[in-house]
């Protein structure tokens, strides 16, 4: 059986290279392939131990599909995923089991992701049972410690999910993810279903847990302000691709891709003076269909700075600490070699 091994200190915890997740649709009566939806179309990034990578973008851009492709919850169509140098993409459920302890997920809906027929104590203890962690007699004590760690009264362990609020249910999901002491947790819209005040509490909880436990996050969200508060680096996705990737302050203070600029211009600013003086970038049209093949930039039809070459030449994600997939940035017109 394939088993995880310790990685060198310089090696990223998670390495994703050219990941693709395509869905195929067949005709009902002929069985002929009629449509290929390119939900994720070749993305690459690394996640270091203890850091948070934020993924942002419009609905349907492939953020959640990326998360599920990384965790082998849905099969990848191409590319590689490595955890501490060990390839995990394409593994069977049995082969993937040793890695499940290191890779956990917090889902968007804190109610649908919890079994309504199981008590909170059973929900949090179940991962320990699966991986045979701790002595069976001590697992109840560990469950109580986890509930206390996420801000819930340990006496609640015999209650059922419907007896809790949305924020409390999400804390239960966090406790369940932490039960196996993972190295990486994927937070898939983990706060989007919560009230704003509860969002702040959960975000602060995740940051505190990261400082205490050293766990890494892939944090998926729509809210740019939330991502800036928690992420170390941010990747902006559009139509199944990463169009910009940079350190969080660099990306928010110096966005280079026109799509990133448009997203940030739409995000509200708490300063009334700044809000009234800044210019809003309004994108025209709709997000194009992921079942089309684009010879050039997939953002070209909506880009306010588009040039003719953008429809013909596909941009590549280029750069070191600040990567951008845009011809206007990477290959500006008139930039002749000296």
Image (cartoon, rainbow, N blue to C red):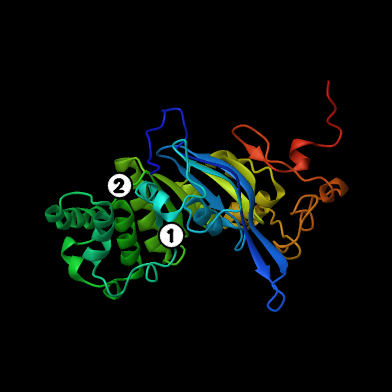
Q: Quadrant of the C terminus?
A: top right
Which of the pair 301/33 is nearer the observer?
33
* Number of numbered labels in the structure image: 2
Q: Position of residue 143 (x, y in %)?
A: 20, 57
**Mark 1 surroundings: few (<14), some (14-19) or many (≥20) residues within 10 A:** many
Q: Quadrant of the N terminus?
A: top left
The image quarter containing residue 21 is bottom right
Dot 2 corresponds to which residue? 181
Closer to the chain start, of discs 1 and 2, is 2
Does the image show residue 270? no
Name the secondary structure under disc 2: loop
Dot 1 corresponds to which residue? 190
Q: Position of residue 272 (x, y in %)?
A: 57, 56
Q: Residue at x 29, y 50 (%)?
A: 180
Q: Is residue 165 left or right of residue 238?
A: left
Q: Is residue 39 left or right of residue 54?
A: right
């Amino acid at each position: 059986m394939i088993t995880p091994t310790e990685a060198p200190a310089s090696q990223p915890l998670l390495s994703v290279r050219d990941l693709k997740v395509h869905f195929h649709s067949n005709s009902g009566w002929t069985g002929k392939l009629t449509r290929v939806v390119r939900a994720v179309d070749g993305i690459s990034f690394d996640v270091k131990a203890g850091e948070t990578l934020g993924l942002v973008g419009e609905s349907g851009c492939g953020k959640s599909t990326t998360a599920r492709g990384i965790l082998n919850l849905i099969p990848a169509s191409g590319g590689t995923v490595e955890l501490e140098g060990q390839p995990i993409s394409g593994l069977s459920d049995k082969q993937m089991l040793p890695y499940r302890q290191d890779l956990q997920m917090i889902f968007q809906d804190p109610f649908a992701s919890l079994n309504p027929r199981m008590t909170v104590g059973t929900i949090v203890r179940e991962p320990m049972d699966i991986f045979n962690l701790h002595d069976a007699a001590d697992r109840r004590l560990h469950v109580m410690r986890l509930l206390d760690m996420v801000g819930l009264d340990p006496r609640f362990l015999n209650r059922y999910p419907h007896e809790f609020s949305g924020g409390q249910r999400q804390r239960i999901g966090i406790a369940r993810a932490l039960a196996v002491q993972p190295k990486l947790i994927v937070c898939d819209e983990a706060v989007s279903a919560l009230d704003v005040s509860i969002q702040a509490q959960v975000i602060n909880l995740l940051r505190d847990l990261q400082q205490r436990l050293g766990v890494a996050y892939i944090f998926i969200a729509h809210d740019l302000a939330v991502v800036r508060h928690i992420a170390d680096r941010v990747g902006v996705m559009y139509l199944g691709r990463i169009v910009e990737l940079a350190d969080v302050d660099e990306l928010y203070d110096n966005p280079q891709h026109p799509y990133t600029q448009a997203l940030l211009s739409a995000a509200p600013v708490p300063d009334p003076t700044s809000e009234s003086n800044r210019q809003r970038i309004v994108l025209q049209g709709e997000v194009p269909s992921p079942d089309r093949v684009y010879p050039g930039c997939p953002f070209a039809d909506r880009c306010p700075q588009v040039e003719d070459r953008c429809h013909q030449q596909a941009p590549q994600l280029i750069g070191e600490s600040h990567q951008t997939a845009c011809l206007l940035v990477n290959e500006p017109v008139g930039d002749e070699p000296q």
